[in-house]
Amino acid sequence: MKVLVTGANGYLGQGIVQSILEKGHEVIATDISTKFVDKRARRIDGDLFSIENPYEYFEKPDVLLHLAWKDGFVHYSDAHIIELPKHYSFIQKMAQSDVKKISVMGSMHEIGFFEGSIDENTSCNPESFYGIAKNALREITKIYCKQNNKKYQWLRGYYIVGNSEFGSSIFSKITAAEKEGRKTFPFTMGLNQFDFLNYEEFCEQVSSAVVQDKVNGIINICSGRPEKLADRVERFIKENGYKIKLEYGAFPDRPYDSKAVWGNSAKIDIICKNSNT
C-alpha cells in the first residue's frame, strides 16, 4: 500500500510515518520541510496547497493520511479559520482523484463541552476556532468521500503523552522546563479527567487504522478510559525521572474543558486486535 502523509515533519507525523513504514507499507511524506522524517520514506518538500493535481504530483497514492494543520495547540488562532479553505480545496482534489481512501486527523475538541464517553454518534458543538475548523473539515471530507465513492476515516485524537520538548502539549512544555533547569511548573488544579495515550501507542493506533479497510468512519484514537490530569502529569514526571514540581492553582481550568471526557475505544480495539493476529 502506498500512503501519502501530509504534515509528515510534525510531532505526530514523524512517529506515524515510522509506524506505517514498519508495517511494510510505502510512504510518500510531504511537508514544508521533511528534515526529521524517516529516511525510508519518499520525502517531498513543498507547499501542499499550491499543487494543482496532488494525486499525480504525489505519485498516485492508494491512501491519503492528512495530518497537516497549523497552530493545532493554539485553539483560538485565526489560522484555523483562515486556512480552512485550503484544506477544503485539497480534500476536494484528492476526493475527485483515483485515491482509494481518505483518512484525516481530527480532534476531540470538535465535540465541545461534553461529559462522558465520546463515540461516533456524539453530537459536535465546538467552542474554539480549532474545534470549529476541524469539525467543518470532518463534514466536508465525509460529503466528498460519499459523493466520490471513497473510503472515509476520521481519526479523532485525544490527549497525547510524550517527552519530546518540541511539541506543544503540557508534557512537552514540562520536558522543556525540566531541561531548562526550572524548579517549578505553573499548573491548574489538575482535577479534570481526560483520555491519555502515550505517543508511541497513538502513532501505532493511527497507522493500524490507516492500513486496514474493514473499520471506517469516525475512529477514536484513544485509551478508552479517563484519568485525572494531575495524576497523569505527576506520573509522567516520575516516569521520566524529572525533578520539577507542579505549582498547583497557578492557572484556572479552561472554561471549555470538560470535567471528565474520554473516547469509546470499541472500533480501535477491533482494529488493533486484528492487526496483531
Image: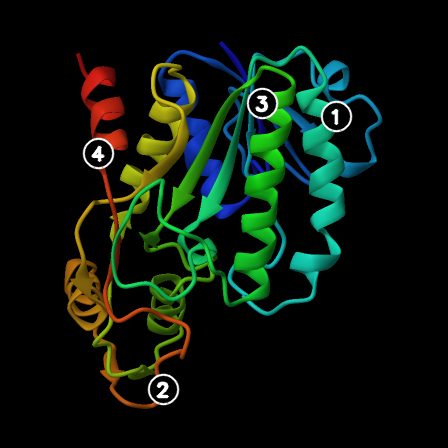
Question: Would you place residue 33 above or below residue 123 in this image?
Answer: above
The answer, for residue 137, to whether it is visible in the render is: yes
Q: Label 2's element?
A: loop
Q: Quadrant of residue 87?
A: top right
Residue hosting label 1: 93
Q: Residue at x 34, y 52 (%)?
A: 160
Q: Nearer the viewer, mark 4 or mark 3?
A: 3
Q: Nearer the viewer, mark 2 or mark 3?
A: 3
Q: CA distance from mark 1 to mark 4?
A: 32 Å
Q: Are marks 3 and 1 in contact (CB under 8 Å)?
A: no
Q: Which mark is residue 146?
A: 3
Which one is nearer the viewer's eye here, 254 or 68?
Answer: 254
Q: Which mark is residue 266?
A: 4
Question: Would you place residue 16 above or below residue 169 in this image?
Answer: above
Q: Label 4's element?
A: helix
Identify the mark nearer the N-term, 1 or 4: 1
